[in-house]
Image (spheres, rainbow, N blue to C red):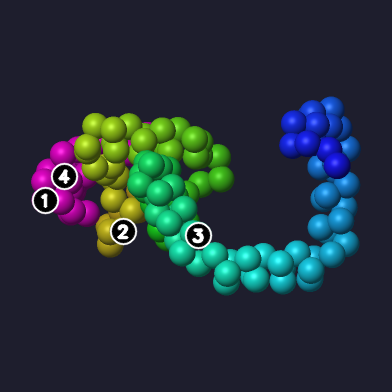
Amino acid sequence: MPTAAENARYYQKHKERLKKKLAEWKSANKDKCLSYGRAWNEKNKEARSASFKAWRLTNKGTRNAAIAAYRATKRKATPKWTCLQAIRDIYEKAVSMKLHVDHIVPINNNLVCGLHVPANLQLLPGLTNQSKGNRTWPDMP
C-alpha cells in the first residue's frame, strides 16, 4: 500500500491528467455527486457552519463587496464593463481602515441613479456616511 508521501508525489506528477479524469467522472455522475455532497453537508453541519464563520471573519472585505455587488445587481446598477476586482480592493481597504464604503451618487434615489463602479465609491467614517444617507451628491439640484 502506497504511503501518503508517495500518493502526493504521484498526484503532483500526474495532476493535470487526474483533474481531467475527475471532471469527466463528475459530469457523467452528476446525481451521485449531488447526493454525496448533500449527505456530507447533512453529516457535517457544525463543521461547515464553523468553517464558514471563520471564513467570514477573515474575509470581511470580500464578503462586504459581494453583498454590495448583489444589491447593486438587483438594482441593475453594475455595468458589465466595471472592474469587480477594483471594487473588492476598495472594500478590503475600508475594512482595514475601519471605514464605510459610500456611493458618491446614490444607487437608490428618486432623482438620480449612480452606478456601482470604482469611480463612484469613496471611503467615509461611519457617522458621516450614515448621516449622508442617499440624500446628497455632487452638483445636487
The kind of secondary structure element at disc 1 is: helix
Q: Mark 4 is on which residue type?
A: Gly
First to last magenta residue range: 117-141
| Near-viewer residue (115 or 7) | 7
| Disc 4 crowd, CA 10 A, few/some/many (<14, 14-19, 20+) | some
First in sequence: mark 2 vs mark 4: 2
Magenta includes 127? yes
Mark pair 2, 4: CA separation: 19 Å
The kind of secondary structure element at disc 4 is: helix
Number of the front mark, 4 or 3: 3
Q: Mark 2 is on which residue type?
A: Asn
Q: Mark 1 is on which residue type?
A: Ser
State the image quarter where residue 99 is shown.
Answer: top left
Residue hosting label 4:
126
Residue 117, percent from left and from top = 42, 40
Residue 54, percent from left and from top = 40, 49
